[in-house]
Image (spheres, rainbow, N blue to C red):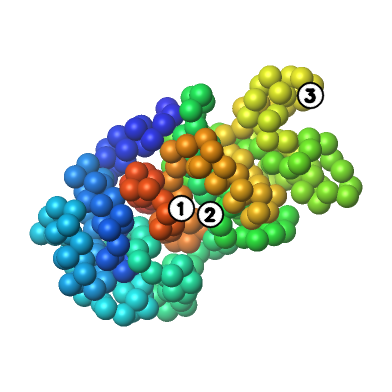
Amino acid sequence: MIKNFDDVLKKAKERGPLTISVAVAEDKHVLEAVWDAKKLGIIDAYLVGNETEICKIASEVEMDLSQFTIINKEDPVEAAREAVSLVSYGKAQVVMKGLVDTAIIMKAVLDKEIGLRGDSILSHVAVFEVKGFDKLFYVTDAAMNIAPSLEEKVKIIENCVEVAHSLDVENPRVGIICAVEKVNEKMEATLHAQELVKMNENGVIKNCTIGGPFALDNAISKEAALIKKIDHPVAGNAEVLMAPDIEAGNILYKALAFFAKAKNAGIIVGARAPIILTSRSDSREAKLYSIALGVMIAFNKK
């Protein structure tokens, strides 16, 4: 069972190498992570961007560019389109954001001609290794969907369950996180939680077990769930933490990353291929883990 990011790297190496395409690759921390992933045998890569700048940075980080294919595209829009096209046409299996605005790469991803639009909505999944826990946590959605409707939450859960399956979690336990653990007519998130649980029980949402509404403590702490007398298979055992909206998801994400110093990876799913969309503030380590996560998801799609 995959319990930490060392396990993720090991499994990604076993299932790789797969090929990623990096849009506007002239970013030091991105190139460092790509080089780390290459040395581990996880990926091959197309580096799309300003070749002069890529070569300059590669020299600084002692990266052997002879092991990569560079495609010179100095314009960020053209570079993003080329990187996405490589995935769309089957030459790569994962696309990664480099030194480019998120809006530019997402426009390419959603382009009707060369894009990667799938049947679901796009959503963000963050994976965390938190000290003191013997499993990984999946937080969704902290970056894409602002105030998802009930129907959108169904798709967000399905997207996240797919990520958990790619990391060998056969039946993810999904906790619908709210401010309270009881249904309150004045709190829409709790009403959504109640409906999502019913959908799961009725087989509408499959391949996972959903519980809620839960406050965060009784979703992840068996002791807290026991004190509140919550009797449900997910109570105190949740792996997937479904946030009610982007504000709550983003705050949870950053609290885990900055207060708890949790190791993390992030990915956009719901397209025909995973999209590695890390922040410039993310560490080299987080970018490496995100690459490995992308490889695991792409392998699972094969």
Give the amino acid at mark 3: Lys
Label 3 SS: loop
Q: Amino acid at mark 2?
A: His
**Residue at horizontal 19%, vertical 45%?**
39
- Dividing the image into 4 quarters, which one contains the N terminus? top left
Taking depth in this image into account, of 47 and 20 the one nearest to the observer is 47
Label 1's element?
A: strand
Mark nearer the N terminus (2 vs 1): 2
Residue 264: x percent and y percent?
Answer: 45, 42
Q: Closer to the camera, 161 or 76?
A: 76
Between the C-alphas of marks 2 and 3, the distance is 31 Å
Which residue is denoted by mark 2 in the rendering? 124
Kindly report the distance in space between the C-alpha atoms of the residues bearing marks 2 and 1.
6 Å
Disc number for residue 267: 1
Residue 23 at x, y percent in the picture: 33, 67
Dot 3: few (<14), some (14–19), or many (≥20) neighbours within 10 Å?
Answer: few
Amino acid carrying mark 1 in the image:
Ile
Residue at mark 3:
228
Q: Residues within 10 Å of mark 2 (few under 14, many from 20)?
A: many
